[in-house]
Image: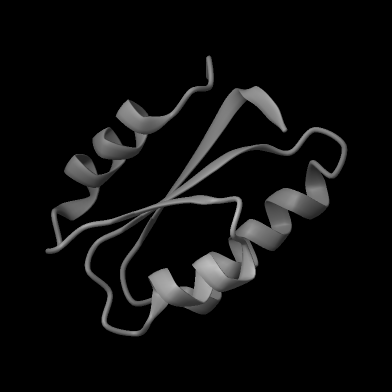
Amino acid sequence: MNESISVIIISYNCKLYVEDCIKSIIFTCYENIPEIIVVDNNSSDGTVEYISELYPDINILANKKNLGYATAINKGVNKSTGEY
């Protein structure tokens, strides 16, 4: 993993789009995969469980309610370890 870059994905009821996004990141950066953090805004479509099962190494933050984009992205940034 390339720990100098963190990619933060905010999700809300879009598990397949999140999966596609993660696949794209991994495919594009296959030699230097960045830290990936998914912040889920209380999805009801099983996003957290689905992504956790497919990508156990990805950090997922599951909010208990929809906090909106700004709060969710800040939560992801606070959890990230990347320089960028």
| Residue 4 placement, left or right of 71 | right
Residues 49 and 24: in front is 49
Residue at x-position 53% and y-position 19%: 84
Q: Residue furthest top?
A: 83
Residue at x-position 17% and y-position 54%: 68
| Rendering quarter of residue 33 | top right
| Residue 20 placement, left or right of 74 | right
Image coordinates of residue 5 in percent, x first then y, are 60, 25
- Say above or below: 71 vs 23: above
| Rendering quarter of residue 67 | bottom left
Image coordinates of residue 27 in percent, x first then y, are 81, 54
Q: How many marks?
A: 0
- Say above or below: 35 vs 50: above
- Say above or below: 66 vs 49: above
Residue at x-position 35% and y-position 85%: 45
Image coordinates of residue 49 in percent, x first then y, are 43, 75
Judging from the image, the colouring scheme is one colour
Residues 54 and 20: in front is 54
Residues 43 and 54: in front is 54
Residues 27 and 46: in front is 46
- Say above or below: 57 vs 32: below
| Residue 12 placement, left or right of 18 | left
Image coordinates of residue 78 in percent, x first then y, are 31, 27
| Quarter of the picture holding the N terminus | top right
Residue at x-position 51% and y-position 66%: 52
